[in-house]
Image (cartoon, rainbow, N blue to C red):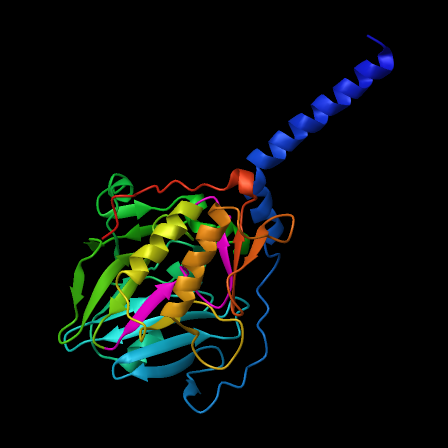
């Protein structure tokens, strides 16, 4: 073999090996690229309109219905929204933001009822991190139950991703496990636990049927939906969309955990979930084009994009196919 040919083959082999390494480490590389150096800089206060009040210089409060409040963090770059839902006997706080500020005094200012904290999923910008709660409930999935030790659940780095903003991976003290499809009785108000995977394996949403509200966490929101993280899955996302559509009506109001712009809490509808479902089918069938190198970007509608792995890396298996109505 000529020396020049041998050198070309060596270079090709090295490039191939490097490519495999980059693919295998893509999630770790992505986390490093997203990592924030130094303290989080807050954006200036926003004009939130007449239905929203500032609780202090950081949190906002918006009454969505009797006993239902959106607690916003519009100065935080991810513009998180958590939801306080009250019955006659107790209340639920669905998500708690990243914990750069303590959300508990905001919730306590709105109710004297005992509050159960429920994370929509385990990413750091929803668990509150250093903020602790007296009562915590999480989704009852077999693989999570198997990791419970003495009522405590140690999250993994892939589930939490807190290193992006310098948060240690927490251990949750779990007081209650929420069965999928079960109802949470707050006294005069019930919430149904829906399994809505895709963004993460453990993602859930809460449906309050009398008001027609669905609290979706990160399953769906205005802006870019992330389906390319290590704990994400395209088949899971399709399952989540099907689960939501089996439970909502065309009149359901969907309140999400992030927004793109002011004012007020981010709101979507059942039509947006149908658009997401249709886009997922089109992607799987090769009927729609993507833009971008990594992640690939698919347009869902004029308010939503889906950011996914390249087609040859997309996982269309459902990790828990039995968890559908």
Q: Position of residue 318 (x, y in %)?
A: 35, 42
Q: Quadrant of residue 320?
A: top left
Quadrant in which the N terminus is drawn: top right
Q: Is residue 227 left or right of residue 128?
A: right
Q: Position of residue 151 (x, y in %)?
A: 22, 47
Q: Which residues are magenta?
A: 211-231
Q: Is residue 124 left or right of residue 77?
A: left
Q: Can residue 216 be spotted in the picture?
A: yes
The one nearer the camera, 49 or 39, is: 49
Q: Can residue 128 be spotted in the picture?
A: no
On whether residue 78 falls in the magenta region, the answer is: no
On whether residue 223 falls in the magenta region, the answer is: yes
- Which residue is at the far top? 1
Q: Is residue 179 left or right of residue 308?
A: left
The one nearer the camera, 6 or 142, is: 6
- Which residue is found at the position 35% from the left and 54% from the top? 240
User: Above or below — where is 11 with respect to 80?
Assistant: above
- Which residue is found at the position 53% from the left and 50% from the top? 287
The one nearer the camera, 72 or 251, is: 251
- Which residue is found at the position 17% from the left and 71% from the top? 186
Count of number-bearing discs: 0
Q: Position of residue 132 (x, y in %)?
A: 33, 61
Q: Position of residue 140 (x, y in %)?
A: 23, 49
């Amino acid at each position: 073999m000529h020396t020049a040919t041998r050198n070309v083959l060596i270079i090709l082999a090295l490039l191939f090996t490097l490519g495999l390494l980059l693919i295998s480490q893509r999630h770790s590389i992505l986390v490093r690229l997203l990592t924030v150096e130094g303290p989080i800089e807050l954006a200036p206060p926003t004009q939130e309109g007449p239905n929203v009040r500032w609780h202090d210089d950081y949190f906002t409060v918006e009454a969505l219905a009797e006993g239902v409040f959106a607690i916003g963090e519009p100065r935080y770059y991810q513009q998180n929204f958590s939801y306080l839902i009250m019955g006659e006997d107790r209340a639920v706080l669905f998500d708690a933001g990243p914990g750069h500020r303590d959300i508990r005094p905001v919730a306590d200012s709105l109710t004297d009822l005992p509050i159960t904290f429920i994370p929509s999923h385990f990413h750091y910008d929803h668990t509150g991190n250093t903020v602790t709660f007296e009562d915590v409930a999480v989704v009852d999935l077999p693989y999570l139950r198997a990791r419970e030790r003495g009522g405590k659940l140690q999250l993994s780095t892939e589930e939490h991703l807190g290193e992006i903003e310098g948060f240690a991976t927490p251990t949750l003290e779990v007081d209650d496990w929420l069965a999928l499809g079960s109802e949470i009785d707050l006294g005069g108000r019930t919430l149904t636990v829906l399994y809505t995977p895709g963004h993460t394996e453990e993602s859930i949403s809460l449906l309050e049927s009398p008001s027609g509200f669905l609290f979706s966490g990160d399953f769906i929101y205005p802006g870019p939906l992330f389906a390319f993280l290590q704990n994400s899955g395209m088949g899971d996302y399709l399952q989540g969309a099907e689960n939501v559509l089996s439970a909502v009506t065309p009149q359901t109001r969907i309140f999400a955990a992030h927004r793109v712009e002011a004012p007020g809490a981010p709101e979507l509808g059942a039509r947006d979930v149908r658009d997401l479902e249709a886009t997922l089918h089109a992607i799987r069938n090769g009927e729609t084009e993507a833009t971008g190198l990594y992640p690939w970007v698919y347009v869902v509608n004029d308010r939503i994009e889906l950011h996914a792995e390249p087609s040859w890396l997309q996982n269309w298996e459902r990790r828990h196919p039995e968890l559908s109505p």
